[in-house]
Image (spheres, rainbow, N blue to C red):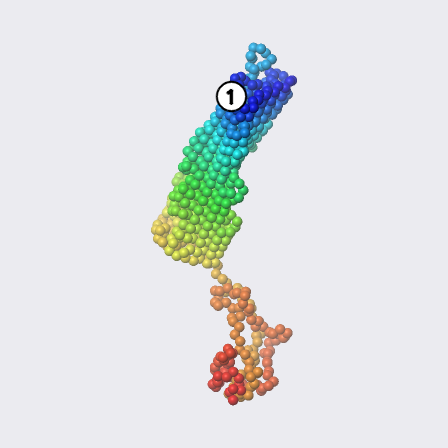
C-alpha cells in the first residue's frame, strides 16, 4: 500500500508545454491503496500549454477498501490553456486544486476540473495497458478549488465541478481577484449533492475588488439531488454584470424534506442584468424548501442598485408545479438606499408549498422605469398561498408607467399581503412621480382565491402623494382589505387613492383606518373607496379624533375618480352597498373638571362696603379691591380640552377652617354694618382699579376724601 510520488515542473519566466498525461497515484483493483501524490506545474510569467492532456492524482480502489487521500494539484502561470485536472480518492478526501496567476493577470482557457463522472486510469501493474474504470460519483469528499489572481482573472470555457457523495460534503470553490476584474465567458461552476448522498454541497465564492461579469451562458449553480443541503453562493464585488444568458441559480430536486436548497448572497453596489434568459434564482422541485436570495451593499453603510436592459431578466424565488416545499425568501437591504431600475423581482409558487416573502430594509426605496416587485400564487391547491411583502422604508418613490409592487392569486390559494412601515418607527412618505405605478393586491380572472391585504402601520406621520393602494378582485374570491393601524396622522395628497374594490362576482374588500387625524387638501381628488360592480361593497371603518377634507358619497358612481373632489364611498353598482362608519372620538366635556364642594362660601359676606355718598368718611386704606384672575382653568367651550397650565380656583373652605354649613361672616371693626345694596355702577380708575358703586355719581378720584 504505497503512496503516489510527487511531480514538480518549474520555469521562472518561460512557457511549459506538456504533450502527455501527468499522473501520480496509488491504484488497486482489489487491494488497499495509499495517498495520491502531489503535482505542481509552475511558471511565474509564462504559459502552461497542456494540449488537452490530463493532470491527475488518484488514490483509488475498485472495491473501496482502505484508501488514502487524493494528492494536491498546483498550477501557476499568466495563462493556462487546454488542461484537464482531477484529484480523487475512493475512500478519503480528494486533494485540493490551486490555480494561481503570476504577478499580474491570469487567463484560463479550456479548463476542465472533474471530481465526479467516469475516470479511467492505466493499471501500472500490468504491461498491456489495461485500464481501470472508476465511477467518481461513488467516491468520498471532493477537494477544495482555489483560483486566485493578483490582477484581472479571465475564465473562458472553464468547467469546475465539486460534488458531495455518500455522507461526505462537497468541497468549496473560491475564485478571487485581489485588485482586478473577474470575467466568466461560457464557463460553468457547479456544486452538487448527488442522489443517495447525505452530505452537504460545497459553497461557491466569487470576490473581486472591481467587477464580476458573467456572459455567454456562463453559470454558477448549486443543486441538491440527495438528502443534504445544497451549497451556498456568495458574490462580493462593487459591480456585478450578467448578460447573454448568464445565470446564478440554487435549486433543490431532492426527494427528501432535508434536502434544502442553497442560498445566494450578493454584496454589490450595482447589479445589472441583460437579455431574456439572464437570471438569479432559487427554487424547489420537491418536498424540501428552497433557499433564499440576499442582496446587500458591497460595503457597510452603502447603497445597492439593481437594473436590467429590459424587464425580462429576473431575480426570483419559486416552487415548481409538482413541488410541496415552500419557496425561498428575497431580502434586499440598503443602508442608504435601494434602487430598482426596470428590474423584475418576484416570488412565485406553482406547487402546494407557500411562495417565499420579499423583505426590504432601507431609508430610501426607489422603483423606476417599469421596475416590478411581484409575489404570485398559481397553485391549484388551497395551501399554496402567495408570498408576502414586508417593506420598511422612510421614503418610497415610484415612477414609470408599469412600475408596481403587487401580490396576486391566479388559482385557489390566497394571495399574500403587502406591509408598509417606516424603517425606524417615524414618518413614512410614499410618492408616485408619474401616473400608473401602484401598490396592488388582486385576484385574476377565473381565480377562486381570496385577494391579499395592504397594511400601512407604525408611523407618526404617513403621507401618500399621488399614490394608489388598491386591492381588487377580478375572480370569484373577495378582494383583500386595506388596513391603516397605529398611525398618528394620515395625510392624502395630490390624487391619492385607497381602494378595495371588485369588478367581477367577488365582494369588495374592507378599509379599516385607525389614526388620530385623517385629512386631505380640498379639491385634490383624494378618495377612499370600497366599491364593486356586482358583489357587495366593502365596509369602510374610520376611527379618528378628527377627519378633515372628505365628503361621503351615498350613491354609486363611476366618476368619483377624476372629479376633483375628495370622496368616501362604499357603494355597489348592482349588489348590496357597504357601510361607512366614521367613529369620531370627540373630547368628553366632563374630562378635566373637578367636583365642587357642597358647602360653598357665602359671597355676600366677602364684599367690603365701598364709597357711599351718604357716608363718605371711609379712609383710603380701607377701600377693598376687585381682581379678575381669568377663567380659573375652565375651557372656553365644552368642546375644548381643559389645560393643565391654568390654575383652577379652590372654591372650598379656606385652609385651617373647619368645614361647616354655617355661613362665614367677616366683620370690619372700624364701621357699623349697614344694609347692602345692589351695585349700580362699575368704575375703572386711572391706575386700573375697578370699583362697584351702589348709588350716586362717581367723581374722578381714587380716594373717598376727594369726594368731600
Instruction: Return the residue nearer the eye: 384 or 8.
Output: 8
Q: Position of residue 643 (x, y in %)?
A: 52, 65
The residue sitting at the front extreme is 13
* Residue at mark 1: 49
Q: Residue at x 63, y 19 (%)?
A: 3
Relative to 34, 678 lies left or right:
left
Q: Secondary structure at mark 1?
A: strand
Q: Residue at x 46, y 42 (%)?
A: 339
Quadrant for residue 618, please give it: bottom right
Q: Position of residue 415 (x, y in %)?
A: 46, 42
The answer to whether residue 266 shows anywhere in this view is no
Instruction: Return the residue nearer the eye: 461 or 152.
Output: 152
Relative to 535, 699 lies left or right:
right
Instruction: Return the residue nearer the eye: 375 or 105.
Output: 105
Q: Is residue 608 above or below residue 120?
A: below
Q: Residue at x 61, y 75 (%)?
A: 660
Q: Is residue 78 above or below residue 504?
A: above
Q: Residue at x 48, y 30 (%)?
A: 184
The residue sitting at the top extreme is 128
Numbered circles on residues, count: 1
Q: Position of residue 254 (x, y in %)?
A: 53, 30
- In the rendered image, the quadrant that contains the N terminus is top right
Amino acid at each position: 500500500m504505497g503512496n503516489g510520488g510527487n511531480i514538480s515542473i518549474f520555469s521562472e519566466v518561460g512557457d511549459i508545454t506538456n504533450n502527455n498525461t501527468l499522473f501520480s497515484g496509488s491504484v488497486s483493483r482489489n487491494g488497499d491503496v495509499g495517498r495520491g501524490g502531489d503535482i505542481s506545474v509552475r511558471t511565474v510569467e509564462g504559459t502552461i500549454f497542456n494540449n488537452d492532456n490530463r493532470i491527475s492524482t488518484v488514490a483509488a480502489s475498485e472495491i473501496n477498501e482502505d484508501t488514502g487521500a487524493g494528492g494536491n494539484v498546483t498550477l501557476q502561470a499568466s495563462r493556462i490553456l487546454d488542461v484537464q485536472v482531477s484529484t480523487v480518492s475512493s475512500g478519503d478526501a480528494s486533494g485540493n486544486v490551486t490555480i494561481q496567476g503570476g504577478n499580474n493577470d491570469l487567463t484560463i482557457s479550456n479548463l476542465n476540473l472533474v471530481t465526479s463522472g467516469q475516470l479511467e486510469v492505466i493499471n501500472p501493474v500490468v504491461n498491456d495497458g489495461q485500464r481501470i474504470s472508476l465511477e467518481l460519483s461513488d467516491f468520498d469528499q471532493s477537494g477544495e478549488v482555489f483560483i486566485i489572481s493578483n490582477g484581472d482573472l479571465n475564465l473562458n470555457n472553464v468547467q469546475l465541478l465539486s460534488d458531495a457523495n455518500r455522507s461526505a460534503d462537497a468541497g468549496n470553490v473560491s475564485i478571487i481577484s485581489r485588485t482586478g476584474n473577474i470575467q466568466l465567458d461560457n464557463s460553468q461552476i457547479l456544486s452538487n449533492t448527488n442522489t443517495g448522498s447525505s452530505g452537504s454541497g460545497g459553497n461557491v465564492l466569487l470576490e473581486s475588488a472591481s467587477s464580476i461579469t458573467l456572459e455567454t451562458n456562463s453559470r454558477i449553480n448549486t443543486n441538491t439531488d440527495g438528502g443534504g443541503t445544497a451549497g451556498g453562493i456568495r458574490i462580493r464585488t462593487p459591480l456585478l454584470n450578467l448578460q447573454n444568458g448568464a445565470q446564478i441559480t440554487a435549486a433543490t430536486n431532492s426527494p427528501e424534506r432535508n434536502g434544502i436548497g442553497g442560498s445566494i448572497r450578493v454584496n454589490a453596489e450595482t447589479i445589472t442584468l441583460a437579455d431574456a434568459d439572464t437570471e438569479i434564482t432559487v427554487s424547489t422541485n420537491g418536498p424540501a424548501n428552497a433557499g433564499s436570495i440576499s442582496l446587500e451593499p458591497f460595503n457597510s453603510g452603502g447603497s445597492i442598485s439593481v437594473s436590467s436592459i429590459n424587464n425580462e431578466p429576473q431575480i426570483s424565488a419559486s416552487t415548481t408545479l409538482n413541488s410541496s416545499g415552500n419557496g425561498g425568501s428575497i431580502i434586499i437591504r440598503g443602508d442608504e438606499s435601494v434602487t430598482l431600475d426596470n428590474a423584475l423581482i418576484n416570488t412565485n409558487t406553482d406547487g402546494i408549498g407557500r411562495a417565499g416573502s420579499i423583505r426590504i430594509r432601507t431609508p430610501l426605496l426607489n422603483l423606476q422605469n417599469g421596475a416590478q416587485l411581484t409575489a404570485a400564487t398559481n397553485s391549484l391547491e388551497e395551501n399554496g398561498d402567495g408570498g408576502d411583502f414586508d417593506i420598511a422604508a422612510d421614503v418610497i418613490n415610484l415612477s414609470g408607467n408599469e412600475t408596481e409592487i403587487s401580490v396576486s392569486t391566479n388559482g385557489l390559494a390566497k394571495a399574500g399581503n403587502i406591509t408598509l412601515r417606516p424603517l425606524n418607527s417615524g414618518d413614512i412618505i410614499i410618492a408616485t412621480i408619474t401616473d400608473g405605478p401602484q401598490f396592488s393586491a388582486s385576484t385574476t380572472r377565473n381565480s377562486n382565491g381570496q385577494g391579499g391585504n395592504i397594511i400601512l402601520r407604525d408611523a407618526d406621520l404617513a403621507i401618500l402623494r399621488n399614490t394608489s393602494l388598491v386591492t381588487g378582485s377580478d375572480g370569484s374570491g373577495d378582494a383583500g382589505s386595506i388596513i391603516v393601524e397605529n398611525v398618528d396622522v394620515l395625510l392624502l395628497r395630490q390624487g391619492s387613492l385607497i381602494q378595495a374594490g371588485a369588478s367581477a362576482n367577488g365582494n369588495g374588500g374592507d378599509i379599516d383606518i385607525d389614526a388620530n387625524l385623517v385629512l386631505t387638501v380640498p379639491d385634490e381628488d383624494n378618495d377612499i373607496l370600497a366599491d364593486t360592480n356586482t358583489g357587495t361593497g366593502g365596509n369602510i371603518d374610520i376611527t379618528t379624533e378628527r377627519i378633515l377634507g372628505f365628503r361621503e358619497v351615498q350613491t354609486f358612481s363611476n366618476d368619483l375618480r377624476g372629479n376633483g373632489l375628495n370622496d368616501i364611498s362604499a357603494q355597489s353598482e348592482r349588489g348590496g352597498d357597504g357601510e361607512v362608519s366614521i367613529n369620531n372620538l370627540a373630547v368628553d366635556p366632563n374630562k378635566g373638571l373637578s367636583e365642587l364642594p357642597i358647602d360653598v362660601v357665602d359671597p355676600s359676606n366677602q364684599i367690603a362696603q365701598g364709597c357711599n355718598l351718604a357716608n363718605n368718611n371711609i379712609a383710603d386704606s380701607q377701600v377693598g379691591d376687585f381682581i379678575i384672575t381669568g377663567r380659573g382653568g375652565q375651557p372656553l367651550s365644552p368642546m375644548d380640552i381643559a389645560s393643565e397650565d391654568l390654575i383652577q380656583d379652590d372654591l372650598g373652605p379656606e385652609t385651617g377652617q373647619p368645614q361647616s354649613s354655617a355661613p362665614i361672616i367677616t366683620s370690619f371693626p372700624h364701621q357699623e354694618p349697614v344694609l347692602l345694596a345692589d351695585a349700580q355702577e362699575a368704575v375703572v380708575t386711572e391706575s386700573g382699579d375697578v370699583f362697584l358703586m351702589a348709588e350716586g355719581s362717581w367723581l374722578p378720584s381714587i380716594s373717598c376724601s376727594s369726594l368731600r
